[in-house]
Image: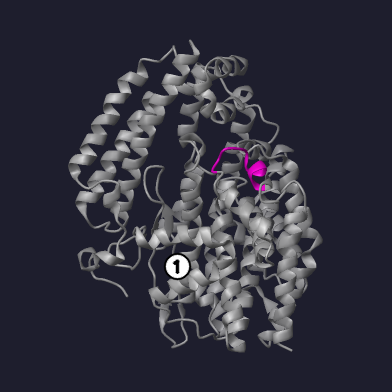
Amino acid sequence: MEYKTRKEVPDEYKWDLSKMYSSIQDIDNDIEKVNSLTPQILEYKDHIMDSSDNLYNFLKLTEEQDRIITKLYVYSKMNFDVDIKDNQTKSLKMRIEKLNESLSEKYSFIEPEMLNESYETVLTYIEENKKLEEYKFYLETIYRFKSHSLTLEQEEIFTKALNAFGNCSEVFSNINNADINLGYIKNEKGEEIELTQSNYITFMKSKDRSIRKSAFHAMYNYYKSLKNTLSSAYVGEIKESSFITNVKKYNSTLERSLFVDNIDISVYKNLIDTVHKNMNLMYDYMGLRCKMLGLDTLHMYDIYVDLTEADNDNIPFDEGKKILFEALKPLGEKYLNDLKKAFDEKWIDIYPSSGKKSGAYSWGCYDSYPYLLLNYNETADAVSTMGHELGHSMHSYYSKSQNYVDSNYPIFLAEIASTVNEVLINDYMYHKAETKEDKIFYLTDFLDTVRTTLFRQTMFAEFEMIMHEKEQNGIPLTEEEISNTYYELNKLYYGNNVISDDDIRYEWSRIPHFYTPFYVYKYATGLSSALSIASRILKGDSKTRDNYLKFLSSGGNDYPLEILKKVGVDMTTSKPIEEALSMFKEKLEELKNLTK
C-alpha cells in the first residue's frame, strides 16, 4: 500500500506528532525559550566551577535548554521525513539546525573550562551538594577525558585542524555515491538495467548465476578502476585518525575509539580470537550452501542467493502486528502491555507515500514518544523490520526511567534490543511455518544474519586493526598492501568451500564504515549479546527475561559492559560470543536435517 501524497494517508496510519507540538505558536514559544536561556548560560563563563551551587545551577540550565532544542530538532526532522517535498517542513528543519549550530559555537568554552578543574573538586562538590548526585556518572564520563584534553588555546587550534580534515571521507562519499557509474547488466528478461548500489543485492540474489556473476564483476570493476584514488583516501583517513590519537595522547587509535565506552582492547581482540576458533562453522555453512545450490564450487557471487522459494509475503499490517505480539510473548506480559502503547498512542508512521523518507527508523527524545518511521510493504521482511525498530523504541521507552543525562544508551548497546526482537520473530516464524521451503527460508535467514553480522563484521574489524597497526609501525600502506591484506582475510574467513574471486580483494574500498574507525565491531558484539540473551529467553529462563527488562531500563547510567552484566552477558569473556555461535550451530544442524 503506497499513497501518492502525504495528504492521502489516513490519520490512522500516521504517527501523532501533535503530542510534541500542536501548533506553530508552540514551536515559536520553545524557540523563544531556548534563546532566553542562552544569555543565562553564558553568564556562567569562567564561573562554572566556582562553587557546587554554580555547577549544579549551570548543569540544570544547560539540561533545560538541551531538552527543548532536542525536542525541536526531533520534531522538525521527523515532520520533514514524512514529506520532504514540503517547503514549510524543510524551512523549519533548517531553522532549528541553524539554531543548534549557533549554540554549539557559543558553548565551545564549557568542556575546557570544566576540565581545567580537578575531578577531586567535583567529588567534593557532590559531597557538599547532594542535588549534584543525579549528575555524578555524567560528570565522571566527562572527567575521564581530562588526561586527553588540551588547553583552551590548543583546543581552538585542534578544532581548526579538524575542520580542515574530513576531505578523505568526502572523496570516498562522492566516489561511492554522487559520481558512481556501475554500467548496465541484463536482467532475467534480457533487459539492459543500470546497476546501482540499491539494486546490487537484488541481482546478487538472482537465481540466474550468470546475472549474479555479471553484477559482481561490474561492481568491483568500478572500484578496481579507482583503486589508487580510493587507497589514497583510505590511507588519508587512517593518517588523520593517527594524528588525533597522537595529539590526544592515546597509545593507539583502537584504544582511543574504545575509550569513550570504557572498553579495554582485550574485548576487541577477544571477539576476533573467538570467531577464529569457530571458523569451522562458517566453512560448514558455506559447504552446505554449495550443496543446496547444486554447484560444484561456490564463488563470492553465490553467497547471497536465497536457497529456497518461500511463500511469506502478503502479510497485511494487522496480521503483522498479531505475529509480532505472538512472537514476543517470551518477553513477558509487562513488555507486551507496554508494547501495545506503540499502536494505541500512535507512535508509528506505517505506509510509504510520495516524498516520504525510505527505510525505517526509531527516534524520539526524552520528552516525546519513541516514534517509528516504517514503509510497511506486507512482506515477512517488513514484519521483521517493524519488530527490529520496536525493539529500539521499547529500549528508549524503558530508558526514560533514568534521569535525563543518564537516559541515552550508548551505541555499543543500541542494536541489542532490536536484534533480540528479530531473533524471537525468526524463531516464531520458523516454528509456525507449515512447509519445508518456509522452514528453510527462516533458518537460512538466521544463518545469513550471523554470517554477515558476526563473521563478516569481525573480518572488517580485524582488517581495520591490521591497517592501523601497520600505519603505527611505519609500514607503507600501498594499494597492493591494503588489497592483499583484505584478500587473505577473506580467504581465511570463508575457507576452502568458497572461491575467493580476485575481485573481492577490492571490497574494502566500498565499505563506508572504514571512514569511522573501529565502529563495525559493535555490530558483531551487539549481535553476540542479543543472541546470548535471546537463546536463554527462548529456553524459558525467566531470570534472564526479568534481568533483560532491567537492562532495557538502564539507559546509559553506567558503562556499557557493566550494564550488560545485569542481564548475565560479560563481554570481557568469550562466553557470549560462544553462546551466539552455539545457536548458529544448532540452526545449521536443523538445516542439514531438513535437507537430507
- Is 265 positioned to the left or the right of 341 in the image? right
Toward the viewer: 92 or 140?
140
Q: Residue furthest right?
A: 277
Quadrant in the rendering for residue 360: bottom left
Q: Residue at x 47, y 18 (%)?
A: 55
Toward the viewer: 98 or 153?
98
| Image quadrant occupied by the C terminus | bottom right
Q: Residue at x 56, y 77 (%)?
A: 429
Residue 109 visible in the shown view:
no
Q: Residue at x 57, y 42 (%)?
A: 236
Question: Where 333 sits versus 239, above or below?
Answer: below
Toward the viewer: 121 or 478?
121
Q: Position of residue 326 (x, y in %)?
A: 52, 72
Region rendered in magenta: 555-564
| Image quadrant occupied by the N terminus | bottom left
- Is 11 positioned to the left or the right of 563 in the image? left
Question: Where 54 sits versus 314, above or below?
Answer: above
Q: Position of residue 44 (x, y in %)?
A: 40, 15
The residue carrying pointer 1 sits among few (fewer than 14), some (14 to 19) or many (20 or more) residues within 10 Å by Cα, namely few
Q: Which residue is mark 1?
A: 198
Q: Position of residue 114 (x, y in %)?
A: 51, 19
Q: Is residue 470 inside the magenta stretch?
A: no
- At label 1, the amino acid type is Ser
Q: Residue at x 47, y 86 (%)?
A: 188
Q: Residue furthest front?
A: 333
Question: Where 139 sits versus 329, above or below?
Answer: above
Question: Where 499 sits versus 358, above or below?
Answer: below
